[in-house]
C-alpha cells in the first residue's frame, strides 16, 4: 500500500464504499468522465449510484474489480422539460462496458445502456468474468453482438436487450448463463450459447 496504508495512486484518500454520480453536472466539465473516475475511487464490492440527470453518461467503462452500478429511475417529483432515467452512452465505436478478465461480482442494475454507433464493438464485453444485468435496457446498433461474453458467468434478470445487428444479440461462449424474465431481440438471432 501507499503512505498511511492507503492504496497508491488514490490521491491519499481511502477507497469509498458508496459513490453518487450525476452525469448532467459532469457535462459542464469537458473531458471529465464521472463514472470512470468513480471506478478508480470505489472500494472492491462498492456501489456506484448514477443519478438521472436527463443526460446520459457519455463514456466507456473499464471495470477491473467487483462493483455494483445502480441507475436511478425518473424521480416521482422530477422537474424540468425532459426527465430521463439514468443512462450510459459510450463514444462512437467504443464498448459501453468492458469487464477485465477474471473479475467476479460485477452487477449493473436499473440502467439504460445505449450503443447506437458501436461499429465493430460489442456494447458489453466480458472475459471469464461474473456479470449480472438486472432491470437493464441495452439498445445496440453495430456490426457485433450487443453482449459478448467468453467464459465466466452471465446473469440476465428482468432485462431488455434490443440489437440491430446481423450477429446474435447476445453471444455467451463457454459461459454459465442464467436468464429470467428477460427479452432478447435481434435482427437475425437473439441468443447464441
Image: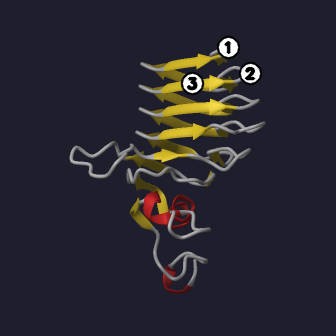
Spatial CA span between label 3 and label 2 = 12 Å
Decide which of tag 3 and tag 2 comes sooner along the chain: 3
Q: CA distance from mark 1 to mark 2?
A: 7 Å
Residue topped by disc 2: 167
Taking 155 as reference, is 108 above or below it?
Answer: below
Pointers 3 and 2 in contact (CB under 8 A)? Answer: no
Q: Residue furthest bottom?
A: 3
Of residues 6 and 115, the one drawn nearer to the viewer in this rendering? 115
Label 3: element kind:
strand
| Residue linked to disc 1 | 189
Q: Position of residue 126 (x, y in %)?
A: 66, 39
Whether pointer 1 and pointer 2 mark residues with C-beta atoms closer than 8 Å, the reply is yes
Q: Read off the residue under disc 3.
A: 162
Task: Say whether residue 165 is left or right of residue 137.
Answer: right
Depth check, front residue: 45 or 96:
96
Of the image marks 1 and 3, the number of the one nearer the N terminus: 3
What x and y, as percent, mark residue 128?
67, 38
Q: Quadrant of residue 146?
A: top right
Q: Residue at x 42, y 40 (%)?
A: 109
Residue sitting at x 62%, y 68%: 31
Placement of 39 over or under 93, stated as above or below: below
Amino acid at each position: 500500500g501507499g503512505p498511511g496504508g492507503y492504496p497508491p495512486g488514490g490521491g491519499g484518500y481511502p477507497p469509498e464504499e458508496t459513490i453518487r454520480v450525476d452525469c448532467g453536472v459532469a457535462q459542464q466539465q469537458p473531458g471529465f468522465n464521472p463514472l470512470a473516475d468513480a471506478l478508480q475511487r470505489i472500494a472492491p464490492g462498492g456501489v456506484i449510484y448514477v443519478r438521472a440527470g436527463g443526460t446520459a453518461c457519455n463514456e466507456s467503462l473499464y471495470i477491473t474489480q467487483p462493483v455494483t452500478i445502480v441507475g436511478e429511475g425518473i424521480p416521482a417529483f422530477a422537474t424540468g422539460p425532459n426527465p430521463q432515467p439514468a443512462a450510459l452512452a459510450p463514444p462512437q465505436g467504443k464498448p459501453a462496458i468492458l469487464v477485465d478478465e477474471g473479475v467476479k461480482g460485477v452487477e449493473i442494475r436499473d440502467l439504460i445502456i445505449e450503443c447506437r454507433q458501436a461499429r465493430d464493438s460489442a456494447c458489453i464485453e466480458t472475459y471469464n468474468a461474473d456479470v449480472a444485468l438486472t432491470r437493464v435496457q441495452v439498445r445496440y446498433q453495430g456490426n457485433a453482438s450487443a453482449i459478448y461474453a467468453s467464459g465466466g458467468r452471465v446473469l440476465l434478470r428482468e432485462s431488455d436487450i434490443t440489437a440491430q445487428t446481423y450477429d446474435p444479440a447476445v453471444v455467451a461462449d463457454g459461459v454459465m448463463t442464467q436468464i429470467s424474465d428477460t427479452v432478447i431481440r435481434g435482427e437475425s438471432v437473439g441468443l447464441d450459447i
